[in-house]
Image: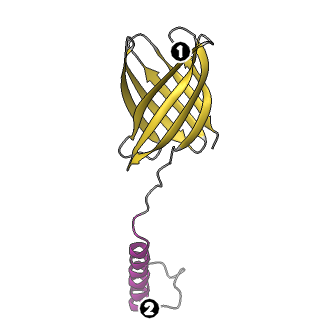
């Protein structure tokens, strides 16, 4: 050890001081427990738009999301295709293990095949990529309440 940092202490008192500091640090960290990131809660009403990267179509999109159990949320998506054709579908968003803001769903749709959605829901922003039988695109929404 460098005497410049502990000029008036003997070797024994320096070792006692270092051991006390180490024990104190361990004690404080054990009292605090493990630090865990808090998971986002996607519940609420959302509004925005969908965009098909396959066809270039886009339209209004909304969603109502509510809890369905730990790390699971029921979502109803609704919107319009070609400005006048309404659509809606229900699915379950499952939090991806090990994440706080990532969700996945898969929904078999009549005539359209299975739509898989991977969403990042952070604060008041919802962004999802979707992939279907002959389509792929993006959902982007903001929380309204």
Work out which quarter of the rendered image holds the N terminus and state it.
bottom left
Residue 94 percent coordinates (x, y): 38, 39
Toward the viewer: 17 or 52?
Answer: 52
Query: Which marked residue is nearer to the observer: mark 2 or mark 1?
Result: 1
Tell me if 26 is positioned left or right of 4 in this view: left
Residue 27 colored in magenta in the image: yes
Tell me if 65 is positioned left or right of 134 in this view: right
Tell me if residue 19 comes above or below residue 113 in the rendering: below
Tell me if residue 67 comes above or below residue 8 in the rendering: above
Question: Real-space Cα distance between discs 2 and 1?
Answer: 73 Å
Residue 140 colored in magenta in the image: no
Residue 67 percent coordinates (x, y): 44, 46
What residue is disc 2 on? 10
What residue is disc 1 on? 52
Tell me if residue 86 comes above or below residue 37 in the rendering: above
Query: Which residues lie in the magenta part?
Result: 10-34
Q: What main secondary structure does the magenta stretch of the protein show? A: helix
Tell me if 125 is positioned left or right of 2 in this view: right
Disc 1 packing (10 Å; few <14; some 14–19; many ≥20): some
Residue 78 percent coordinates (x, y): 54, 26
């Amino acid at each position: 050890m460098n005497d410049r940092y502990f000029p008036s202490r003997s070797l024994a008192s320096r070792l006692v001081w270092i051991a006390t500091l180490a024990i104190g640090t361990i004690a404080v960290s054990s009292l605090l427990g493990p630090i865990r990131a808090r998971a986002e809660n996607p519940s609420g009403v959302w509004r925005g738009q969908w965009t098909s990267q396959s066809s270039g179509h886009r339209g209004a999109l909304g969603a109502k999301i509510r809890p369905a159990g730990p790390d699971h949320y029921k979502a109803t998506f609704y919107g319009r295709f070609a400005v006048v054709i309404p659509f809606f579908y229900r699915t379950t968003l499952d939090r991806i293990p090990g994440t706080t803001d990532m969700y996945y769903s898969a929904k078999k749709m009549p005539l359209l095949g299975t739509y898989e959605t991977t969403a990042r829901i952070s604060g008041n922003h919802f962004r999802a990529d979707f992939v279907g039988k002959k389509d792929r695109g993006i959902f982007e929404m903001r929380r309204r309440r």
